[in-house]
Amino acid sequence: MRKIKIICDSTCDLNAELIAKHDIDIAPLFVNLEDKMYRDGVDITPDEVYVWADKVKSVPKTAAVSQQTLIELFTKYIQEDYDIFYTGISSEMSASYHVATMAANEIAPDRIAVLDSRNLSTGIGHSVLKAVELAESGMTVQEIKDELESNFVSKVRASFVVDSTTYLYRGGRCSAISAFGATALSIKPSIVVENGKMRPDARYQGSLSRCLLKYAKKMTPALLEADNRRVFITHSGIDPTILEKVKDYVDSLNYFREVIITRAGCVISSHCGYGTLGILYVTK
């Protein structure tokens, strides 16, 4: 049986430790600042994106993984006698899935399996780590894809609380009136991923710290019925004391074997802005 290479796009938001531990390859999406393209996590950082966005009062445009990048990456591992499992951001949110499918079909469709994660950020990360587990169990790449499509992707739960609606407004995802009202009333909206798309959910009022603890407490019944192997706390840059409070709360549940903190990359951060945090888990 051939070795399997796991590849995902840069929106998976896994941390460097997990990427290195499981020998995962990352294909970067693109961020466009003033008509110059940067590779997510390679040429630019989220903090640099924020500096630019605040300076020009706009948000960057983002673009899918380039087909040429994937062709080169897939070719490299096929020539090294790997089969390839690939996944990335939901097909409802980006063209990246379709680009990857076309690249796989061009190179070796019988040896490259491309999964639509139907998710974003560490919602994808959950599927990637499950793929690693299945690969280690001896499954082929097609069997991994089939298992994830049938029994895993629909179980991943991703949601976030956004500190400021500024980036949502600049990106055309909420009106000026809504953005102003949210800011004036200290309202922090939450967003959930459902059927591969994002939709607004609850609204929390008060300081970010208070809102995030309300969000975590609201999720508690679901968390205590989740798969207890791991939960991600993923943020786009946040006050460390606030992050620690959320982690302490999740730790206090004494339920998850691993509580993993990761920081969102440039593409995710470009759409939500600084101060966004999510708790992402898998149902049983």
Image (cartoon, rainbow, N blue to C red):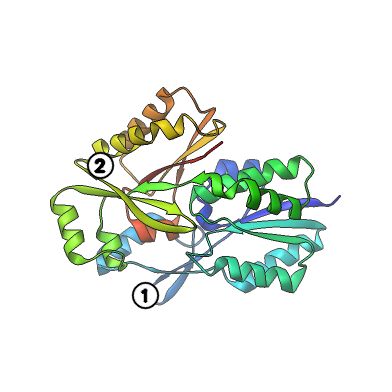
Residue 244: give its label. none
Along the line of sight, the residue nearer the viewer: 268 or 120: 120
- Give above or below for 243 relative to 127: above
How many marks do you count on the picture? 2
Residue for badge 1: 34
Furthest toward the left, the residue is 184
Residue for badge 2: 208
Judge the density around disc 2: few (<14), some (14-19), many (≥20) Cα neighbours within 10 Å.
many
- Give above or below for 238 relative to 40: above
- Is 13 positioned to the left or the right of 206 in the image? right
Q: Position of residue 60 (x, y in %)?
A: 37, 68
Which quarter of the picture shows residue 76? bottom right
Q: Position of residue 157 (x, y in %)?
A: 48, 45
- Can residue 202 be seen from the camera position used here? yes
Q: Residue at x 43, y 74 (%)?
A: 36
- Give above or below for 201 relative to 283: below
